[in-house]
Image: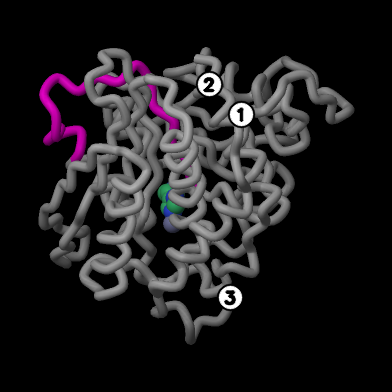
Amino acid sequence: MMKIFTILLATLALAACGKGSASTEAAETPSAETTLSAAPFDADSAYAYVERQVAFGPRVPGTEAHRRAGEWLAAELRRHGAEVILQKTDLTAFDGTRLPAVNIFGRFNPEASQRILLLAHWDCRPWADKDPDPTRRKEPVDGANDGASGVGVLLEIARQLGVSDSGKGVDILFVDAEDWGTDNNENSWALGTRYFVENPPVADYSPREAILLDMVGGEGARFCREYFSQQTAPALNDAIWRTGSALGYNSLFINRMGGAVTDDHIQLIEHGIPAIDIIEFNPDAESGFNPRWHTTSDNMEGIDRATLKAVGETVATYLRDN
Ligand code: AHN
Ligand code: ZN
């Protein structure tokens, strides 16, 4: 399986969306028309959840900020009514560093047999290796967008589940050690999710589907369909992009193919869980990712409530209706 991905990645990683690349046939709707009422989602609350995480300092595995933030995340999930399982383990990074990792698994209605898994990574990259200033490339990143945004949206969804429980089986997973990776080694990323699927904390864990949120708070963010998501869970991708559009967010949920991204969802897909990645991908940008990505400016200044709201409402509404 990994071989196939390697080959596909080599051919597709740079076949970014937009100009000249293969795109879905669906036309973009020209106007932002709302044809669906959104499930409750408070963007100010999601923003505050991003802010709270960043205030701990960079959540790099092995640091005090990481340890304290992890405890707080678990406590928040519990406060909103989830049954929380902490999966603690030492992982080994590509460079041999021992990473004390914690996957934080919050379960709503754990007795429900049909389940949906929502996940985001909560760790921060230890080095801002894409910083424009070469002297700052060994500093850790704040991870306001890369890490905290996905977690912030999911904490707000958890809060809403606590306010009004639908009885559905929903699992919220904050995975660790996603971002201690290196270019040219796709196995160096997503170590926490790899550990989770290889050591499931509950017996026979097989959610119907999974939605990964990664970099969902950037100002001016655009979301294109990610390649592996579309290959393995096209109906889920359809439903999310349709929901986003029906809520009036068709200028963010662009109905085109984006890039092929090495991310936490690949680990789920390889273990038979249909999974999609909602990840910023700007068809008009050089790398596709946000310009603050893996730089020291991935801080609160790059976070826009409007982006958190579009993604949060879309996922919350999908959850309500499915
Ligand atoms: C790579 O850089 C190969 N994939 C992006 C995965 C990632 C890093 N998501 C957030 N940070
Ligand atoms: Zn990253």
Disc nearer the start of the sequence (3/1): 1
Which secondary structure, mark 1?
A: loop
| Residue sitting nearer the eye, 78 or 28 | 78
Is residue 44 shown left or right of residue 53?
A: right
Q: Is residue 208 visible?
A: yes
Residue receiving disc 3:
132
Q: Which mark is residue 320?
A: 2
Q: Position of residue 252 (x, y in %)?
A: 71, 38
Q: Position of residue 70 (x, y in %)?
A: 28, 60
Residue receiving disc 1:
39
Is residue 83 shown left or right of residue 12?
A: left
Figure disc tally: 3
Image point (28%, 39%), residue name: 106
Question: In this view, which residue lies farthest toward the front?
Answer: 163
Image point (44%, 31%), residue name: 211
The magenta stretch spans which residues? 196-214
Q: Is residue 128 visible?
A: no
| Circles 1 and 2 in contact, beta carbons < 8 Å | yes
Quarter where residue 112 is shown: top left
| Residue sitting nearer the eye, 263 or 40 | 40
